Image: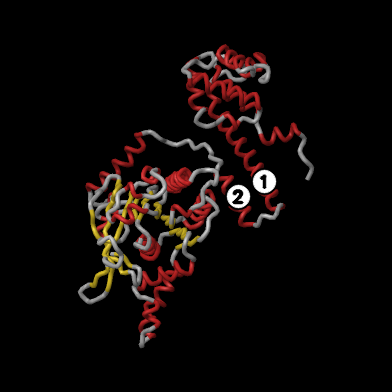
Amino acid sequence: MEDLPKEKAIEVHANLDAEKIALGSCLLTDAEQASKAYDDIIQIVVESDFYYRPNQIIFTCMREIANKGDDINELNLHEILRKKDLLDEVGGMAYIYAIANSCETAVQSLTAAKIVRERSNARRIVRSSRLVVERIDSGADADEAKAFIESEIAKIDGFIDEDVSLGNVGSKFIDQVKLMRDGKYEPVRIPTGIPHLDSKLPEGGIGNGEVMVISAPTSCGKSQLALNIALRLAIRDKKGVAVFSLEMPSEQIFKRMVQISSCCNLEEANNSIDKETAFKPIIEATEKVRDSPIYVYNHVRNISDLRAKCRNLKRKFDISMVVIDYLQLVPWDSRMTKNDGIAEVSHSIKQMAMELNIAVILLAQVNREGAKRGKLSVYDLKDSGDIENDADIILMMWCTNHDMEKSRKLDKSGKPYIDLSYSLVKNREGERDTVDKFIFDNSVGRIF
């Protein structure tokens, strides 16, 4: 296929008339209309969305004028361009006047801005497509190319004309209050399935768009707690769950899920005299887990790759929850410090939860001092204080007697378990800082 002539390429991938109108609406003689037009446009486009270089420069200068609190008009625009020695580069006052005369009212400003943004997105898609072809030609495999283009497309944030008025929110809240009054309200939250824990969470569970951090010393059951919650949601409620297990292979995850679901230990069943009876619940649980809407990944290239996979699962299977085991294993930008990289990953996970309107359970390590001390606080989260800011709920758990062996006990029937303590050190709109206990049957991975 022949390359398009330069003029034709501009016509396909840009709309210079729309760019002029968008800028021109900010230079209307009616200062009030011009100010309103700028306020609308600035929410839709950024400088790089303009294809024509002079238009990028002019919009940048308009932003600087507005940030100083001055009116955007021809004289102020001329002055800032002159001081920056950019007047000739944009075509002088003749081009500024041409822009001002391209728009007579602010009516077209929003439409023009949306066209500018849409054409900018089209150029980004074309550029990303060319780059992915180059990567494939250079030897990248299909999975690498797919992850790259998904991460690039994810950066294209289309303008959404949202209803952000409190009136809209208030109407929904009134409906909720009426349902509560009539005894018909059902919270749209995900229960953990552990009654004493759910009783402390707002409306009995984890909300959509929320991130629940579970943190504990090594081998204290945080992965098992997350799997208990995920299995309940997938098997009982038939809702999709994505599990990013970055330290355990899928086979080990599947085995743990089967043992949790069956409440049977595989090794104990194998050593049983009556194997048919011992393996019956395990086989039944295997089929349940196999047929459940759980999707397991053992590797991600970076946080963009993780988000792309979640978007794909949300689109295809409408997943309700994501489990990430664990935060410190998600690769970050190597140019950042460890703390900054983990903070960036933490921010991205919170943004993903809100974007996809799903619950996220994020496992995190504790620092050495906290692991030695016993009872944990929010300050014991390892590597980054930003985790605390991004999380909606933070559950810290530890061995009750500060040592795994000392915390081993026997129930009334002589069956061993581990006594774990926990505290919700952060819990928006719910009970916090109250210490309670889990019973951890580590032979099958169940937590009560």
Which residue is at the front of the view, 365 or 47?
365
Residue extending furthest right? 2
201 vs 13, left or right, is: left
Residue extending furthest left? 412
Q: Are marks 2 and 1 in contact (CB under 8 Å)?
A: yes
298 vs 275, left or right, is: right
Residue 298 point in image, percent of width and height: 50, 61
Looking at the rendered structure, which numbered label has been put on residue 148?
A: 2
Q: Residue at x 37, y 46 (%)?
A: 391
Say which quarter of the image contains residue 198: bottom left
First reached walking from the N terminus: tag 2 or tag 1: 1
Residue extending furthest top? 75
Q: Residue at x 41, y 48 (%)?
A: 383
Quarter in which the C terminus is drawn: bottom left
355 vs 444, left or right, is: right
The CA distance from mark 2 to mark 1 is 9 Å
Residue type at mark 1 is Leu
Give the residue pinned by disc 1. 131
Which residue is at the front of the view, 320 or 70?
70
How many neighbours does mark 2 have within 10 angstroms: few (below 14), some (14-19), or many (20 or more)? many
Say above or below: 403 vs 308. Answer: below
Residue 278 point in image, percent of width and height: 36, 82
Residue 251 point in image, percent of width and height: 48, 69
Q: Secondary structure at mark 2?
A: helix
How many neighbours does mark 1 have within 10 angstroms: few (below 14), some (14-19), or many (20 or more)? some
Residue type at mark 2 is Phe
